[in-house]
Image (cartoon, helix red, strand yellow):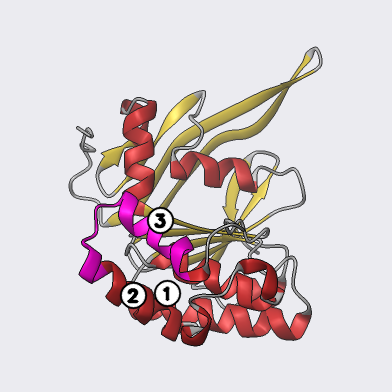
Amino acid sequence: MSPTSSSSTASTALIELRGLRRSFTEGEKQHLVLDGVTAQIDRGETVALRGRSGSGKSTLLNLISGIDTPDEGSVVVAGINLTDLDERERTLYRREHIGFVYQAFNLIPTLSVADNLRLVLELNGVSKPETADRIAGHLDAVDLGDRAASFPDVLSGGEQQRVAIARALCHEPSVILADEPTGNLDDATADNVLAVLSKLIRETGATMIMATHSNSIAATCDRTLELHNGKLEPSR
């Protein structure tokens, strides 16, 4: 991958969103989801992303991850301008720099817990001895060290999400993108999972953007940004 560095070398931001516009065609109409979104997020910062359903939260996360590209504007992460990358380069960038935690756990059901993590590490070229150490360390960190050989279907929802957190962090990405990560869990389990996620994010120094509808979950982050009518604004 030969990423193009941002010209804004003086900026301390890890993530820079510059005038993002993104629209989608619905029937014969164009639906503008993001309208000139601009923001900076610092290294190690945790940001809650709020907005009603359909406001563009997932769209914005997809732009930051390089899954999608904007109609206008640019996304710069760690000096890499994603809009200058082709699809293969964005895939390599995403594999190395991004960890995902979704509402749906998205574990591979035919792989054991350990192998779900191992796949991510192998794709990133981590050596076998280091892979074994990281799998053990990250499963211990989410209190699932004794479930390495288990398959996802025998785990509870909270356990599956903790595996997903370990998988998201095991390749040591600089950015974690969490899209309603506790949306499929009951309140008590959600609190437990969120506590694990928040603790590990603080310990690793990763930057996290978390889409959520919950005021209490947003309150655990350093600040909250709100999507409203295509604009991104500080939460009131």
Q: Is 75 part of what is drawn in magenta?
A: no
Which element is circle 2 on? helix
Q: Mark 2 points at which residue?
A: 204
- How many neighbours does mark 1 have within 10 angstroms: few (below 14), some (14-19), or many (20 or more)? many
Give the residues drawn in magenta, as a range. 114-130
- How many neighbours does mark 3 have within 10 angstroms: few (below 14), some (14-19), or many (20 or more)? some
Foreground residue, 4 or 185? 185
Foreground residue, 221 or 226? 221
Instruction: Give above or below for 35 relative to 207.
Output: above
Disc 2 marks a residue whose amino acid type is Thr
Q: Do the residues labelled 1 and 3 touch (CB within 8 Å)?
A: no
Disc 3 marks a residue whose amino acid type is Leu
Comparing marks 1 and 3, which lies closer to the viewer? 3
Q: Which residue appears at 67% of the width and 60% of the height?
A: 103
Foreground residue, 106 or 66? 106
Q: Is residue 41 visible?
A: no
Instruction: Give above or below for 71 relative to 2.
Output: above
Q: Which of marks 2 and 3 is nearer the N terminus?
A: 3
Left or right relative to 173: residue 62 = right
Identity of the residue furthest to the right in this view: 27
Q: Please tell me the numbered disc located at residue 201.
A: 1
Which element is circle 3 on? helix
Q: Distance between the residues labelled 1 and 2?
A: 5 Å
Instruction: Give above or below for 61 relative to 103.
Output: above
User: Quadrant location of the N terminus?
Assistant: top left
Left or right relative to 24: residue 3 = left
Q: Name the residue under label 3.
A: 119
Q: How far apart are marks 1 and 3 (CA)?
A: 21 Å
Q: Are marks 1 and 2 in contact (CB under 8 Å)?
A: yes
Left or right relative to 105: residue 8 = left
Q: Which residue appears at 48% of the width and 24% of the height?
A: 72
Disc 1 marks a residue whose amino acid type is Ile
